[in-house]
Image (cartoon, rainbow, N blue to C red):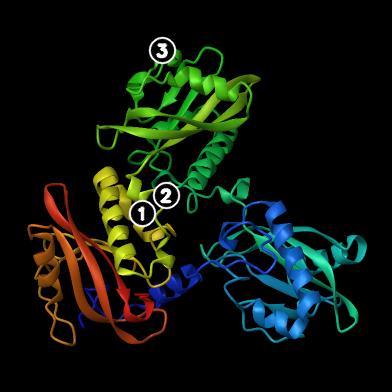
């Protein structure tokens, strides 16, 4: 196989590691249904506490041996959330999902700030019985060292004091605002936009007037349809509007969308009684020039004692794309077909700004599922294992069974339907096996070229 075709050749070890980290089992409820949803979506101390306390109850009900096996399953481990347990002497009992020898001594382990993590766990266990412990730790989803919040609670192990715990990685701390983690091109969901605006507020507090310039010009803060706006709460005058710069200096209380919603007054109404919230209205999308329904997340902030509105918005996708499962959960042909069609919509809306989402956002890459984008010459515009701009342009790749894959892809996107399935063989990065793979391909025009947007399912992924 030729290496210039990463979606058709032996996938590099780097991709395999990335996709394995992004992989997560399909959500399942713990026996006591503690956290109210998918474990990977835990984002509050209350949810975390309920989950860990549920695990402690489970140990009491079934014993350590059975519980340790259960904690390895999808009901108890998902994405960055997993259980760990230790003795009162700082010895490991278990770490779900990690091959570690029980009894290993981690008493002197320190984080990147020099904090003794186990000392903190044991102090809370000894003096309080349960509580929160804060430190930095590797996030298995992002691969970055990030601030982590853990909750531990007392249990017994072989008649001696021990603890069971789990953690999550909060997205609302100043240390979570690295450009590697938060930037306009990665804003896709409500959680993304809330984190984006919160980080923009911190940037404004740290940089002052320089931040206003950054919001208008720095690609970190403006990309495609994602941009920041800042306005005076009392007068409703716009101070920054990176996506609609002609509105700077205008009276926001006079801004009425095509749907009749007075955007400025509705924002004031929400923030007069709440610190943050969402405002829904119709508004031109600067990436397409077309009006679209938009939900903007707004925060009331104080600068030199004066109240301002800081916000950013999400344009509502087509109805069939609003509840799209993340890449790691797609396991049927119908779901994959819709996944690729929604990716095509993103290309139409964001253009090349969509590549960052395809390469880095868990909505679009996870497990063995990833998108690849080819230009008219079958060279890559976006693929998770190969840099863009590879030039060969022959469209002549043939897999080991003789399938002319490039030609099949071009045939689908140039057909009357403009889309279709292509079957070939490829090594699955999760299990290392060469398997049949079916990719759905959709054509979309970008920069006057008919490009191909595609993603596929391996045989071992398919559920019907």
Q: CA distance from mark 3 to mark 2?
A: 31 Å
Q: Residues within 10 Å of mark 2 (few under 14, many from 20)?
A: many
Depth check, front residue: 234 or 12: 234
Residue 205, percent from left and from top: 59, 32
Q: SS class of the residue under badge 3?
A: helix
Q: Is residue 205 above or below residue 104?
A: above
Q: Residue at x 73, y 59 (%)?
A: 50
Q: Answer few, some or many: residues within 10 Å of disc 3's Cα (few below 14, many 20 plus, some between 14 and 19).
A: few
Q: Which residue is mark 3?
A: 254
Q: Which mark is residue 243?
A: none
Q: Who comes first in sequence, dot 1 or dot 3?
A: 3
Q: Nearer the viewer, residue 124 or 35?
A: 35
Vertical placement of residue 46 versus 392, above or below: above
Under circle 1, the secondary element is: helix
Point out the tag, 3 or 2, that comes first from the N-terminus: 2
Q: Which mark is residue 356?
A: 1
* Rendered residue at 44%/60% (across/down): 362
């Amino acid at each position: 196989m030729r290496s210039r075709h990463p979606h058709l050749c032996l996938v590099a070890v780097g991709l395999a590691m990335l996709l394995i980290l992004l992989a997560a089992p399909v959500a399942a409820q713990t026996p006591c249904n503690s956290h109210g949803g998918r474990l990977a979506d835990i984002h509050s101390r209350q949810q975390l506490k309920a989950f860990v306390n549920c695990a402690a109850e489970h140990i009491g009900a079934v014993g350590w041996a059975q519980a340790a096996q259960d904690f390895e399953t999808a009901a108890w481990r998902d994405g960055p959330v997993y259980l760990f347990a230790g003795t009162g002497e700082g010895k490991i009992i278990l770490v779900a999902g990690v091959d570690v020898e029980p009894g290993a001594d981690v008493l002197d382990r320190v984080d990147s700030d020099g904090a003794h993590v186990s000392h903190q766990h044991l102090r809370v266990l000894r003096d309080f019985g349960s509580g929160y412990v804060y430190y930095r730790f590797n996030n298995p989803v992002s691969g970055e060292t990030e601030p982590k919040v853990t909750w531990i609670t007392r249990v017994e192990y072989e008649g001696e004091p021990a603890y069971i715990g789990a953690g999550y990685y909060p997205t609302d701390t100043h240390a979570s605002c690295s450009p590697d983690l938060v930037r306009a091109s990665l804003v896709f969901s409500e959680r993304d936009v809330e984190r984006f605006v919160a980080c923009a507020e911190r940037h404004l507090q740290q940089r002052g007037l320089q931040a206003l310039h950054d919001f208008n010009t720095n690609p970190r803060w403006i990309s495609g349809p994602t941009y920041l706006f800042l306005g005076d709460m009392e007068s409703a005058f716009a101070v920054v509007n990176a996506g609609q710069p002609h509105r700077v200096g205008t009276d926001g209380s006079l801004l009425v969308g095509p749907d009749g919603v007075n955007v400025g007054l509705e924002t004031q109404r929400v923030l007069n009684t709440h610190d943050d919230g969402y405002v829904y209205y119709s508004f031109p999308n600067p990436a397409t020039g077309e009006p679209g329904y938009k939900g903007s997340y707004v925060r009331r902030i104080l600068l030199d004692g004066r109240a301002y509105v800081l916000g950013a918005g999400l344009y509502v996708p087509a109805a069939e794309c609003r509840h799209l499962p993340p890449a790691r959960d797609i396991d049927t042909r119908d779901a994959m077909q819709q996944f690729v069609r929604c990716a095509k919509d993103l290309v139409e809306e964001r253009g090349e700004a969509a590549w960052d989402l395809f390469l880095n956002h868990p909505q679009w890459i996870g497990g063995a599922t990833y998108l690849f984008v080819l230009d008219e010459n079958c060279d890559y515009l976006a693929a998770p294992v190969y840099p863009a701009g590879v030039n060969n342009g022959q469209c002549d790749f043939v897999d080991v069974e003789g399938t002319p894959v490039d030609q099949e892809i071009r045939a689908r996107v140039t057909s009357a339907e403009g889309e279709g399935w292509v079957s070939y063989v490829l090594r699955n990065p999760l299990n290392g096996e060469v398997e049949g793979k079916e990719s759905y391909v959709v054509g979309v025009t970008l920069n006057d070229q008919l490009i191909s947007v595609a993603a596929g399912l391996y045989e071992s992924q398919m559920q019907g």
